[in-house]
Image (tube, grey):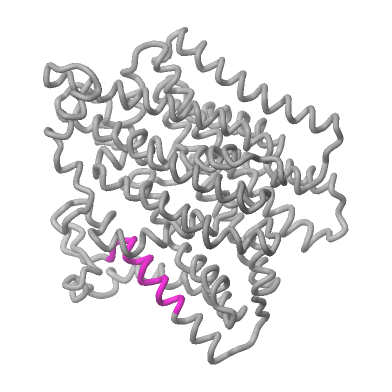
Amino acid sequence: MNLISRLDTIVFLFYFVVVAGYGLWVYRRKKSANTSASHDYFLAEGSLTWWAIGASLIASNISAEQFIGMSGSGFRIGMAIAVYELMAAATLVIVAVFFMPVYLKNHIYTMPQFLEQRYGKAVATTMALFWLGLYVVVNLTSILYLGALAIGSVTGIGVLPCMLFLAVFAAIITLGGMKVIGYTDVIQVTCLVIGGLVTTWLALDLVAKLGNGHGALQGFSTLYNSTRDHFEMVLGRDNPNYMDLPGLSTLIGGMWIVNLNYWGCNQYITQRALGADLPTARKGLLFAAFLKLLMPVIVVMPGIAAFALDRSGVLGDAMRVGGELNPDRAYPTLLALLPSGLKGIAFAALTAAVVASLAGKANSIATIFTLDIYQKRLHPNVSEQKMVWVGRMTVVVSMLLAVLIAPLMGIDKKGGFQYIQEYTGFVSPGILAMFLLGFFWKKTTSSAAMFATVGGLVFSIILKFLPGMMDLSFLAPIGFAHDNGSGVYEIPFLDRMFIVFWLVVAGMVLLSTVFARGKVKG
């Protein structure tokens, strides 16, 4: 059943026309001005302000996996899941101070370009192909699928039509290049912050009514008093969600691997700042860090509110699919409860988050393929105009692939956010080790970097499936293994990332010391 009223439709269409219209206007203006420089298209070189960079970073980061997946984790785990957001803010400061000067000093436009300068062509090409596969098969498809699932649950439209709509909408924005993405993201992030805060405010007001109160402040008090266990920030070993957030080791171990890799070594993120000068880039990253501090209120609090409302019976069977509880339905269910008009604002915020992330991810895919594969490996003498054309075609092809693959992906009972975090965590430790040693240890060799690429994945797979081959209970006293509830001791995936990171670092140091060969540039 369609839950969107005529007023909601008008509000949403206004948002759609403003964003899509602006994207088409900039695209046509650039076309008429014959501005076909590839760096202008892929990086908006020198044309993004610090506030546009910061807003674009957040708009690209806050997608369906945050609105849908993290709200679902808030429903299931509680406020502890907000550690991803809070530590991301701290990580952005580190990236601004230590990572960005290295990239800009060496005129880096893509992450594979840095790897080529530091380690050589073999490592750069391997990682370029790897990132393309990861971005299309895992990231782009998950954003598309979760976004379509949410929009379909609110509008009553099927998942496939919703995916097609989101893919086309994002493609319209992406075809204009990074400048269009950057400035439309300012509109997108404004929509998602306002719409997200509106949803949180009204969700808390609904909770207040459970205690015969009124208003968001009263609702927060009621929510805190009735769901204290959902406001624990560090989970104990007796918590059923300990495998997802393993206590204090979350704060000193794997969470740093997740964030440093995502915010410092990720084309999808760093691309926003690579076209700016250092002061502008740093201000943009710090502005993004400030906006990150709002995210627990916008994306986690609604999930906890939905938990309280579901437990009280207010939501009926809305949180269940086939009789089974589905935490990822928390945010869409709350949207359905909002008043007419406000629902349209919240719906626009959700769509803005999904479309901005799709556009940013597609642009990064196009950038890596065009600059690191097509130009350097296939057609070295390609013209600037042809490179822009190839980039646009790559956007279209990647969107089509995502639409075809997305219905086949399996998001397990962990929920969408945890699903993405765990499976990208198979490769994060190796990538981060490769970059950090490349930054700060001149003796690191290309063979060591190649080991990080393959070894990190191999170690992650071994530790993931080790519980099926041997008893890991001996690791329980030191906190690196935990009973999953069925008598089998497993390593929490954040701890697994921490262990793999240090194994890879040790291997790289050994290879660089014992086999001191390979291309090394300081």
Residue 194 locus on image (x, y percent): 43, 25
Q: Does residue 4 sit above or below 284 in this rendering? A: above
Which residue corresponds to the image point at 34% horizontal and 61% vertical from the top-left? Answer: 494
Q: Does residue 125 show up?
A: yes
Main SS category, magenta section:
helix
The quarter of the rendered structure image containing the C terminus is bottom right
Left or right placement of residue 97 versus residue 25 in this view: left
Residue 503 shown in magenta: yes
Left or right placement of residue 65 versus residue 470 in this view: right
In the image, 304 versus 72, the foreground residue is 304
In the image, 117 versus 378, the foreground residue is 117
Residue 175 locus on image (x, y percent): 71, 36
Residue 205 locus on image (x, y percent): 24, 20
Magenta span: 491-505
Q: Does residue 151 sit above or below 293 in this rendering? A: above
In the image, 239 versus 397, the foreground residue is 239
In the image, 142 versus 258, the foreground residue is 258
Residue found at the very far top of the displayed protein? 6
Left or right placement of residue 104 versus residue 512 in this view: right
Left or right placement of residue 302 versus residue 357 in this view: left
The quarter of the rendered structure image containing the N terminus is top left
Which residue corresponds to the image point at 70% horizontal and 71% vertical from the top-left? Answer: 121
Residue found at the very far front of the displayed protein? 279
Q: Does residue 403 show up?
A: no
Which residue corresponds to the image point at 45% horizontal and 19% vertical from the top-left? Answer: 345
Residue 159 shown in magenta: no
Which residue corresponds to the image point at 45% horizontal and 46% vertical from the top-left? Answer: 289
Number of marks drawn: 0
Q: Does residue 97 sit above or below 179 in this rendering? A: below
Residue 177 locus on image (x, y percent): 70, 39
Q: Does residue 399 sit above or below 9 in this rendering? A: below
State which quadrant residue 293 falls in: top left
